[in-house]
Image: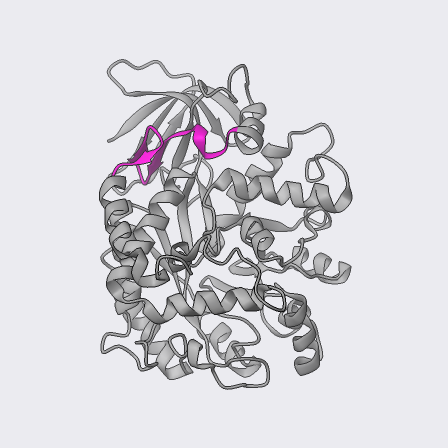
Amino acid sequence: MPRVIMEHALVGADWRRNVDLEWDDAGCIVAVTPDSVASGIETIAGVSIPGIANLHSHTFQRAIAGVSESLGVGGDTFWTWRQAMYRAVERLNPDNLHAVAALAFAEMLEGGFTAVAEFHYIHNAPDGRPYADRAVMAQAIVEAAAETNMGLTLLPVFYAHGGFGGKPLETAQRRFGSDLDGFAKLVETSAAALKSLPGSALGIAPHSLRAVAPAELKTLAHSFSGKPIHIHAAEQVREVEECVASLGRRPVEFLLDELPVGKEWCLVHSTHLTPAETQRLAQSGAVAGLCPVTEANLGDGIFPAGAYLKAGGRLGVGTDSNIHIDAAEELRQLEYSQRLHHKARNVLAEPGRSTGRRLFDAAVASAAPVLARQVGALQLGNRADFVVLDTGHLSMLGRAGDTWLDSWIFAAGKEAVREVWAGGRRVVNQGRHIAAEAIRRRYAGIVNQLTDGNS
């Protein structure tokens, strides 16, 4: 069976030396043996850590990164940014979606992510009618994951309404739309597409309370009980206000009151919480899927991470709009947002402990139930997903133990990622994905189709 010796590795709670890691042909770990001495086995120099799961991504939005950074007449908000996103949606087809997704997945791997929950909501043709093959756009995502060896949990999105109260879909939203019967067919065909990708998983994503009526959401929760269920919640103040006006309760309050929210649920963003909601969400066992870089870029607000962690809440990070893809940067921005809000340092650390270690452990531990994949710590049965940090990087010199994580997250970032192994395959070497040249060349050939070269 394949195996390597890791010079330094984080195994469970401990930093160990000369870790003999062995996995089977399916890429699952079958042995973890620290303090090993073996000849003829490849030795991985540097520091090996478990890969991080990206809990929330819209890969196609990688194509518009940086094209909406100018102030429009009357101000600029999430809601005006959405119009730029909709313009790109109109131009997507299976071929250019594959090109964008492959680039995003390769960059995720280069940045330390080894698995992704793809919140995939572009299902229909530009005129709003379903494709003959309902999963043809999902197939493009699957093929991109196969090309890059990204661990994929596909989340087909149910999107039925253009706003609270059953508001009709806007013209720009017609590519997302479905009814319950159509969605059932979409999930079925998506499951068939995933059969070609070993180790992949399937969940669902009711888009949000503004796009899914309560009765529809309850039907989906019943039909897909035990599967990952991801939903946008309380990202924007306006969304909260409209939810209160329509449903009489705040979004997270409503979800916790009315739905069986538990460990397979990921509430994405959950930015605007009351203290009571913060406590209840933490106690529910659900995961808060935070996207700190996107949330900062869109001006969403700041999640109450300190109170949430103190209440025992589970959280992870995602790249959402893919404006900048770097696992360390997501964790750094999460802590820095708290520092700015509280005017203090090391807000999310436990007394006397490393902030980077607290953030890293939280992200690694949260992923498996909401991805329906065996990911996380370097332990028996989990995927052999690990990231190798370069201890020769200038920001890593002279570090050891948890300070390796602090220096990666707060100083070096993705520049310190030397190798990434996913499912036992080395997919990033010397900081670059092994298929980067072909992937980047293909992307360069299609990006102007989506952006007109500027916006």
The correct choice, above or below, for 13 with respect to 153 in the image is above
- In this rendering, position of residue 189 left or right of residue 312: left
Pinpoint residue 245: horizontal percent, then vertical percent: 70, 81
The correct choice, above or below, for 99 with respect to 25 in the image is below
* Residue at 55%, 60% in the rendered image: 268
Between 382 and 246, the residue placed more toward the observer is: 246
Asked if residue 417 shows in the view, the reply is yes
- Does the magenta segment cover residue 202? no
**Which quarter shows the C terminus?**
bottom left
Q: Residue furthest front?
A: 73
Between 18 and 104, the residue placed more toward the observer is: 104
Pinpoint residue 155: horizontal percent, then vertical percent: 41, 63
Pinpoint residue 420: horizontal percent, then vertical percent: 36, 34
Pinpoint residue 393: horizontal percent, then vertical percent: 46, 21
Q: Residue 34's image quarter?
A: top left
Between 12 and 49, the residue placed more toward the observer is: 49
Asked if residue 373 shows in the view, the reply is no
* Residue at 62%, 70% in the rendered image: 255
**Which quarter shows the N terminus?**
top left
- Does the magenta segment cover residue 414? yes
Count all numbered tags in the image, as a single digit. 0
- In this rendering, position of residue 412 left or right of residue 302: left
The correct choice, above or below, for 420 with respect to 120 in the image is above
Instruction: Specify start and end residues of the magenta stretch as a single range.
Output: 412-434
- In this rendering, position of residue 297 left or right of residue 27: right
* Residue at 26%, 68% in the rendered image: 136
Q: Residue 111's image quarter?
A: top left
* Residue at 44%, 30% in the rendered image: 415
What colour scheme was applied to this rendering of the protein?
one colour
